[in-house]
Image (tube, rainbow, N blue to C red):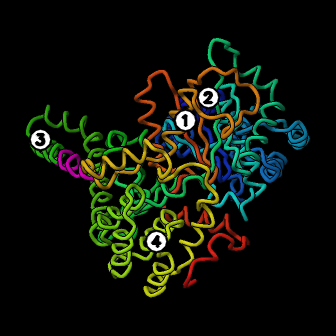
Amino acid sequence: MNVIQAVKMYITKMTEESGPGMKVILMDKETTSIVSMVYSQSEILQKEVYLFERIDSHAKWDNMKHMKCIVFIRPTSENIALLSRELRDPKYGVYFIYFSNVVSKADIKTLAECDEEEAVREVQEVFADYLAVDRHLFSFNIVGCLQGRVWNQQHLQRVSQGLLALLLSLKRRACVRYEAASEPCARLAERVRDLLRREAVLIDNSIPYNGELPPTQLLIIDRRNDPVTPLLSQWTYQAMVHELLTINNNRVSLAHVPDVPKDFREVVLSSEQDDFYAKNLYSNFGEIGQTIKSLMEEFQTKAKSNQKVESISDMKNFVEQYPLFKKMSGTVTKHVTVVGELSACVGRHKLLEVSELEQEIVCQSDHSKHLQRLKALLADGALRDSDAARLASLYALRYEKHAGQGVGAALELLRARGAADGAPLAALEYGGAHARHGDLFGLQDAVKITNRLFKGLNGVENIYTQHTPPLKDTIEDLLRGKLREAQYPTLGGDDGRRPTHVVVFVVGGATYEESLCVHQINKANPGAKVVLGGTTIHNSASFFEEIKSAMQGVHRTHTKHIRNV
């Protein structure tokens, strides 16, 4: 169950089926992102694709009848209209059309009527209709999937179609389970089940039935049940880059970094194209510093050996080694720049102190100490307003039911800084105790209380990574067959056997910290394969946007009692 491999396979199929010769690939905004996530431009060029065009660009090109056109678009009404216009006056010699999902017969008929010159050679459905972020991680890049706590209908349709495509691309028959306490999860589960029923013939033709294996389980859960994980500071390389610099379709902007080389104003961080990044995705910040040092030393050794070009054979070796040397030089510069900026952010904004308090708030119980330290940090001018809002929100979520809670005092301190005080209140309305069914902070579970007590007595291995996302327990319970049916009911197709293949989808967005948990679960259970997806992959900034969208037009009902508001 490798989502990058699944998408790559479809794109390779498209480039090969059109045969040899010069090709152009015509895409829409979304399919451009889908392709760029798994292939670099140089890799696509090797497949004789020399031109990349957007179907909505309206660019005026001369006729290029010598070129074959691969069309890869989503089957939306807008794209059908744009493709119809293209086929009425074709610029290219022949067209091979691939839709990223199921396309209706009516749309095919419309295109056939427009193809008067009979330029179309193929029309096929390929199911690469999601962004493959990592081998076990996918996303739809939708921030704000809920509006006023209910689905935006366009987003609901996009996500349900995307999940159908995911199952078809992974060649998996699935039964759907969902979080019973969540209305959005129930709506999405019903929509996916209806699509699976409607496309039963396609599924039967595409996915051979294997009665020996239990069906794959698609588990749909709600971000509101765990609003804490996206608000925490991160200390593993991938998650940290996303939190502090933001990863957007594998790209990171460094334009704001002083004296950054021109070629490194935007860098690509892809585990498929960058070996150093692939090896260090999940390394913590301390380890990354050491690894970068080793990389630098290795590079300097190679640079010195390349300086000794004295004989013909030296020249020959240098020419052969040069592309690798150049690539290594780029890798070193890129990661030194990125890690340097991360380090500067940590020092500049006191992120170690911020993170220590965050972890203590969510993993320990000491209200008066936490409130005292929170007030001291909120009054510190070195803190960014966004970090102050995160701290106040975490405190509010943790202690909302505490008799002496000081949420009002925290809001007053946010206002005194000149920061907006709406974030903690919105976080409470979005994911407070009334919205959650689980024991997020381990306050009722005897085992969790005992573990926390021992942690307090023995100390912890790393004060910055005490928190474990609740998603880890949920997946482990599911793989053991212990996930309660009452809390996570099944919609059709489950035969009671413990699943070995699981797709977990988070309505409201997943995080890189949860992706690390899934990576660890896959590593620890060789027989199990878990894939994680979300409406988007959050950092704290995008999560506050998510909350804002979900609470749009919703009246405050659970925070009226808080003073100083």
Q: Nearer the viewer, residue 150 or 561?
A: 561
Q: Position of residue 373 (x, y in %)?
A: 33, 72
Q: Earlier in the sequence, mark 4 or mark 2?
A: 2
Residue type (three-letter) at the residue carrying disc 4: Ala
Q: Is residue 293 magenta?
A: yes
Residue at numbered disc 3: 305
> For the residues marked 1 and 4, what is the alpha-carbon distance in whole angstroms?
33 Å
Splitting the image into 4 quarters, where does residue 295 fall? Answer: top left
> Circle 3: is it few (<14), some (14-19), or many (20+) Cα within 10 Å?
few
Q: Viewer-proximal residue, 314 or 280?
A: 280
Three-letter amino acid code of the residue under disc 1? Val
Q: Earlier in the sequence, mark 1 or mark 4?
A: 4
Q: Choose top left, top right, bottom left or bottom right for residue 283.
A: top left
Q: Splitting the image into 4 quarters, where does residue 299 fall?
A: top left
Q: Residue at x 42, y 70 (%)?
A: 387
Residue 152's disc is none
Circle nearer the N terminus (1, 3): 3
Neighbor class of circle 1 (other Cα within 10 Å; few <14, some 14-19, many 20+) is: many
Q: Residue at x 42, y 74 (%)?
A: 388
Residue behind mark 2: 170
Which residue is tagged 4?
A: 392
Element type at marker 4?
A: helix
Q: Is residue 335 left or right of residue 554?
A: left
Q: Which mark is residue 531?
A: 1
Magenta range: 285-296
Sequence order check, earlier mark of 2 and 1: 2
Q: Position of residue 172 (x, y in %)?
A: 65, 25
Compared to residue 315, the image places residue 260 above or below, namely below
Q: Examine the residues drawn in magenta and state their main secondary structure.
A: helix
Q: CA gap, disc 4 to disc 3?
A: 54 Å
Kind of residue sitting beneath label 3: Ser
